[in-house]
Amino acid sequence: MVLKLAIQKSGRLHEDSMKLLNDCGIGIKNGHNQLKSVADNFPIEAYFLRDDDIPQYVEDGVAHIGIVGENVLYEKNKSVDIVEKLGFGKCRLSIAVKKTDEYGDARFLEGKKIATSYPFLTQDFLNKNGVNAEIHEISGSVELAPGIGLADVVCDLVSSGSTLFMNGLKEVEPILQSEAVMVRTKELTEEQQSVLNQLLFRIRSVRKAKR
Ligand code: PRT
Ligand code: ZN
C-alpha cells in the first residue's frame, strides 16, 4: 500500500512542496516530465498535477492527500478535509480598483464589471455584502482587464502588490487570506491514515525545528 499524494507539477507551490517532503526525509524525484513518482524510503507516491485539479482528485480519492492553496480549494468547493496548514504559498485574494478610484466599501462594486479567475469566491463576497455586480471569468492576466476596458475592477491574488501597482491598480479589500494546506480524502483505510499520521508527525517536527 502506498499513500497517493497530489502536488503541483510546476508553479509557485511546486518547489516548496518538494522541499517539505525532502525536509521530512522523503526522497521523491522531481516530476517535470512524469505524472508520478514513488518515494524510495516511505510509502508515498507523488502525482504531479495542475493545482486546479488537485481538489477533485482528492475528493474522488484518486489521490488520498494533496497540497494545494486555500484559494483554489475554496474556489473549487470540493468535499475534502484540511489536515494541516503548511505556512508557504501565502497570498490573499483581494478586490483591486483603479488607483484613482475612491472605493469606500463594497457598495462601490454595485453594477460594476469584475474580472477574476475566482468567480465562486467573488460571487460569495458580493452576496455577503448584498451587492449586484457582473463577474467576468478570465483565466490569466486578470490585472490587465481594467486597462483594456474589459472590467472596472479585479478580484485577484496578491502577495507583494507590485503586479497591481504596475498595472495602475490598488488593493482595497482582501476577501480571503490563503496559504498552502494539506488536504485529505474523506475515506481512508486505517493503514492509509496511519501513513498520513507518520507524514504529519514529520511535517510538524520539521516546521517546529524551523521556528
Ligand atoms: O499550472 P497550474 O495551474 O498548476 O498553476 P497556476 O498558474 O494556476 O498557479 P501558480 O503556480 O501561479 O500559483 C499556485 C498557487 O500559489 C496559487 O493558487 C496560490 O495559492 C499561491 N500563490 C502565492 C500565488 C501568489 N502567491 C501570487 N502572487 N499565486 C499567484 N500569484 C500571482 C497573482 O495571481 C498575480 O498575478 O502573482 C501575481 C501577484 O504577485 P505580487 O507579488 O505582484 O502581488
Ligand atoms: Zn492553476
Image: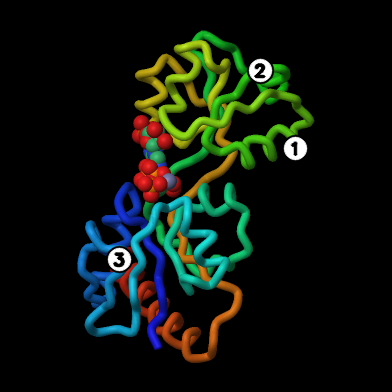
User: Residues under labels 1 and 2: Cα distance?
Assistant: 16 Å
User: Residues under labels 1 and 3: Cα distance?
Assistant: 36 Å
Q: Which residue is drawn at 72% across and 21% down?
A: 107
Q: Mark 2 points at which residue?
A: 112
Q: Which corner quadrant of the figure contains ligand 1?
A: top left
- Placement of 62 over or under 152, stated as above or below: below
**Element at label 1:** helix
User: Residues under labels 3 and 2: Cα distance?
Assistant: 42 Å
Quarter where residue 24 is shown: bottom left
Q: Residue 20 carries which label?
A: 3
Frontmost of labels 3 and 2 is 2
Q: 25 or 104: nearer the eye?
A: 25
61 left or right, relative to 9: right
State whether label 2 is within 8 Å of ligand 1.
Answer: no
**Element at label 2:** loop
Q: Which of marks 1 and 3 is nearer the N terminus?
A: 3
174 left or right, relative to 209: right
Q: Name the residue under label 1.
A: 128
Residue 66 locus on image (x, y percent): 44, 65
Colour approach in the figure? rainbow
Quarter where residue 123 is shown: top right
Frontmost of labels 1 and 2 is 2
Q: In which quarter of the image is the C terminus?
A: bottom left
The amino acid sitting under disc 2 is: Lys
Instruction: Say if residue 160 shows up in the picture.
Output: no
Q: Earlier in the sequence, mark 1 or mark 2?
A: 2
Q: Residues within 10 Å of mark 3 (few under 14, many from 20)?
A: some
The amino acid sitting under disc 1 is: Lys
